[in-house]
Structures are given as structure tokens and as C-alpha cells.
Amino acid sequence: MPIRVSIVEDLAEVRDGLAELIRSDKELFLLDNFDNAEAAAEKLPYLKADIVIMDINLPGMSGIECIRVIKEKCPGTQFMMFTVYENDEKVLQAMQAGATGYLLKRTKPQNILESIKELSQGGSPMSSNIARKLLNIFLNEKKSTKKEVLSDRENDVLQLLADGLLYKEIAERLRIAHGTVRHHIHHIYEKLHVQNRTEAVNKFFDRN
Amino acid sequence: MYSTHPDDPSNYLEQKLFFKPELTGISPRSIVLDKNDDFWIGTRNHGIHVFTIQKGKLIKKFSLTTAAGLSDDFITHLSCDQENNIWASSALGLDKISNKTGAPVIENITRQNNIFQSVFDVVLDKDNIAWGIVSNGLIKITPELKKKSDYIPTLMVSMLKTEKDTIYEEQPLSYTQNNLSFSFAATSFFNEKQILYSYRLHGGSNNQWPEPSNLSTVSFIDLHPGDYALEIKAVFPAGRYPPQFLSYKFSITAPWWQTWWFHSLAALFIITALFFVSRYYYRRKLEIKMAALEKQQAIEKERTRIATDMHDDLGAGLSRIKFLSQALETKNPDNAAIKTGLEKITNFSDEMAEKMGEIIWALNQKNDTLADLVAYIRSYALEYLSNHDIACTMDTPLHLPETFIAGEMRRNIFLAVKECLHNIIKHAQATSVNFSVRLNELIEIVIHDNGKGIDWNHLRAAGMGLQNITKRMNEVNGKASFLNENGAKVILRIPLSL
């Protein structure tokens, strides 16, 4: 079964270049692409994509907003943010909205394909910058709900990542496989999203 | 001394005792034997000497002179009355010496009665009246009445004067009335001129009783405000009355600026003033600090805005170039020259995007903690070196502090590290690098490679790099050291002061 991929990107050259790259890989199957978030929000729930490569800055609705709207309607879809650099505050926002991975625009073509496949297998990337911000978010969450949000191992991974360690270093230090680190991070993103959604629901009920 | 023998005229006088040595030099002129068998000898110019005879020896008991109160030291005649008082006549008058208690008390009888005549001799009749011979007749001295009077003289302050006025009412004196003159008197009605007064001031500086004198006034100058008691002692002549004491209390009030309430008010005022001044000072300081902080924040905000703009616009443009050239590359797989060119374009745009990412990182105020800095340079160094196939051992602290580090400082430190790593790739020919970060009061970054070291004699391209590192360290008050220890060792030390 090839991985079903869709692209939301407003720049035609980038979108086409990426589309071309995906088409060239037999393990991937390219679905419809979109040049704006509104159209994507409308169609994506029916496309049943495995991976959606989502640009952040789009005309009109942003990529983050788009994920927020359709995340619940696309249970089997993983959203991969397409960004110029990984320390962007917006990447974090997208993760909170429900994205589980990101792709740097400067990534070499071969690595782009690898990243897509890795995400579909439940592996996610994370920069030390984002890790540190997540640590604070989960720390506050722990304080306010008195509840273990992350598992011990996830907490270790996040902490080491925040200290600037690379995946392979974390894997060595924790004596786990490289891929396992990515899996932990994937779960952290999912918990972040769940936590964020719960918070939103809580806020909604509080208001009434 | 002789004894008489009326029955034997041939031996009528017999010398019994001879006292020449004892009496030499005092020129005796008169003698009397008192009721206690003491000899009183009046002398020429040596007063009265009193002797007693014990076992044939003449023993002197005491002597009296004008210093003790006699009218004169030349005693022409001595008499003893029924009450054992000795009457001494002299050219300057008559003295009566009573000797009841053992301490003789001298009364100048004539002078007390305003008689200033020579008295040649005194005799006493059976009524104990003394009759004195003076040049123009007799004087008669009647003894005092036996009846003891219960009268006790009153000692009082008769007048209190300041420099200007006499004070009549007993009231607190003001601080200007501090030069005081007291007059006092004792109502003895007898020999008042011979009453001896002594005084001392409690509350003043001198608490001693001075020598008694018959002066009945005392002055004090420049008394400080306070409570005083002037103690006066009056001693009466001939012990006629027991000594009298008086304690006269008075007080001088302090001027208003020396009172406790004024001092408290002044202290309160000073404390309040200090409080307000210091509050003003700290507020002002805080305001200045706030203003500086606001300015800093404005700068940081502006930087973040630039970073965002760069990210959004330039980032989009760069990725466009990259994907365009990539598309062209796939469309022309056979033309080697075009392919190489397009590959270069792709690489350059990636490189630019990467560099931009670094600049944006340094500009963004959201990354302004020490933790951000250390984590960032750590992952940068590791990634950069492994991309160039150089092994890297890392020694950086975990659980980094969130200490604030301004964007400018962060940028300089990062770029200095980057320059070091760049030099290793370009010049060192190293195969491994040890990268360590230590944090105490300063950040210490040590980058140690195993390459050929720094050749100080042939510095060319790398020379610029070292200069840049030094310059960047200077800008953050830091210091860069370059050593050769089995390869090049660069130590960057940056003080962590805010």
C-alpha cells in the first residue's frame, strides 16, 4: 500500500516541484493538491490522505488554522508542516493544533521522501528549541492538573532534546533505537494535541 | 615651779620643777589653772599654750592662736570662771574660751559687742560676772542666761537674683535666667556675722562642700537647663545652735529646641524626609530602568518583526528558487553543464536558507535564554561537524538555566563558535573535535580539534577568522584564547553579567 500524500502550498513552483518528487517515488501516491487552506479544508476529509504536507503561510486561512479545523474530521491523516526553519514559533503552534511532523524546505529531495515515510511509520522530528518550549508547556500542565502527562521516558527524551542533544546521542544515552526516539516524539506531539484539545473543550464549557 | 614653806622663812621658796626647755621661745606672760588642773599659759606673740603635768613632766595639750580665732596672740592676762571658761585679755580685746567638749570654742567677747579697746585684766565675781579693765574704766560682762532656749534659727534663701531682676516667685526659670545669685540668712539673732555658711549645688558639676565662710551669697553662672538643689549649711558660732541645713530646689527649663518633644519631632521629620527622598530616588532609578527596559524591548520587538518578515518573504522566495531549479534539473537530465549549474543554485539557496535561519534565530527575542544559546550551538556544532565527517565529542551541561541573554550577545557568541568550526573544516585537517561548554559566572566554550594546529607563521585566510572571533568576543566583554595542544584549542570566555 503506497502512502497517500496531499500537498497544500500556495507557491506553484514549490508545489509542483514537490509533487514531481513524490510522483517519482513508487512508495508514495500523490492525491489532489491545493493552493489555499479553504479549499483544502473542504476536500481533505474526503481524500483520506495518510500524509498532508501543509505550508504555514497561505493566503487567507493559515495552514495552522486549517489543521485546527479539519484535524478531527481526518482521523487517519498526519499533518506535516512545511517550513523554512525549524525554530519557528508557528511550528509549535501547528504541533499544538495537531500536526505531528515538520519538513524543512531546504531539505534535500532524497531526505524529503525519507521524512515522509518516517512520519507515516510514526516517527517525528523535533528541534531543541521546540523541545524546550514543550517542556515548559507540559511542566505547567503537570502543575495545574497534578497529573502525569508524559511518560518518564518521553520526559527524558524531551529534556535531552531541550539540552541540545541530537537524536543519535539521545538514543545512545537512553540505550534505545534511533527510530524509538522519533516514536517518543511522535507521542509527545499527539499528547500535546490532546492536551490542547481538552483545554479548548474545557474553555468552551467554562464559557457557557 | 616652786613650793612655799610659810613655816620655814629661811627656805620659804623651794624649787620643785623646772620647765625651762619646754617654755623656751614662747615668752610666757600670764598663767591660770583651770578646773581640770590644766595650765593655760598666755604668751607674747605665741597665743595660748595649754599644758598638763604628769609625773613631774610638763606635757603640751594644745595651743590657740589668732588662726583659731583669738583676738590677739599677745595674751596679757588669763582668768578662769566658775564654769571653767578661760578669759583671755589682750591689747585687741577680750576672748572667752569654753572648753566643755574638749574642743575649745573661742568667742571674741569685746568685738561681738562692738567694743574695740585693749583689755588689761579680767576678774570674776561670785555671780560669775566678768569685769574687765580697759583704759578708760571697766567693762561688765554678764553671763548668759542659764535657761536653754528651744529656739532653732531658720535658714532661708533671702533673695534670688538673675543678672537683671530679682526673682520673687518660685517658678521654673527660663534658660536665659542661668546666671543666678543666691543670698541666704539664718535667723539666729545672735552673732549673725559669725555664722559660717557652706553650700553645694546638686545637679551642677561640683558636688563638694567648700570651706565654710561667713559670706552669705553665692553666684552661679552659665547653668545648664535641668533640676537643681542648692544645699546650704549654716554653722553657728560657739555651737550655740545645731548646724542648720537647707535644700533649695529650683529648675531651669530647657529652650524649646532642647526639649524631648522637639527632638522627637525633628527625628520624625528627618526620618520622614529620608523616607521620601529615598523613595523618590528608588522610583526615579526604577523609572530609568523601566525606560531602558522598554527601549530594549522595543528593539527586541523590532528585531523579531524583521526576523518574521525575512522568514515569510525571503524564505518563500528562496524555496521558490530551490524548487524551480530542481524542476529544471529533472527536466534536463542529459545536459551535464546545466545540471551542475542548477545543482549549485539549489545548494546555494539551501545554504542561504540555512544562514537566514541562523540570523533569524539570533534576532528572535523568543530565543533569548542561555538554555536556547547552549542548546542551539551544541546541536549546530554536532550537525555541522558530522556533515563534514568529523567525529565530535560533546561535553555540555544538561538542564540549562533560563538566564536572559540579549540577542546581540547571543549572535556574537554563536557566530564566534561558527567561525571556529568553519576554521576547523577549512584549515585544521582534523578528524575529531571535542566541544565543551561550562557554565559558572561565565560561559566557557572550549573547541579542541586534533588537526595540525594553528601555524602562527603562515596565517592568511584563517588570520581573518581569528580576528573576527577576537572582535566578536570583545563586543561581549569576552576573551578568546588560541592554543596549540595536539591540535588547535580555542577557548571562548564570556562573562555572564546582566
Image (tube, coloured by chain):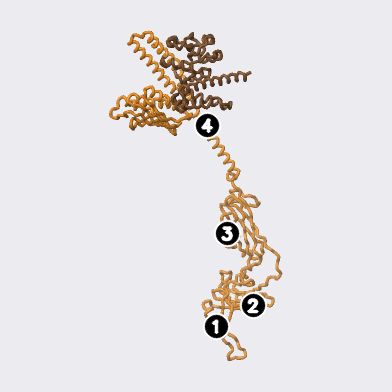
Residue highlighted by disc 2? B35
Residue highlighted by disc 4? B283
In the image, residue B267 lies at what x, y percent? 57, 41
Identified by mark 2, the residue type is Lys
Please give the chain letter of the residue carrying mark 2. Answer: B
- State the CA–CA distance, disc 4 to disc 1: 108 Å
Residue in view at x 62 percent, y 20 percent: A206
Placement of B233 over or under B490, stated as above or below: below
Residue highlighted by disc 1? B18
Identified by mark 1, the residue type is Phe
Residue highlighted by disc 3? B208
Given residues B165 and B324, the one toward you in this image is: B324
Given residues B42 and B458, the one toward you in this image is: B458
Chain letter for the brown colouring in the rendering: A
Evaluate whether residue A170 shows in this view. yes
Residue in view at x 60 percent, y 87 percent: B4
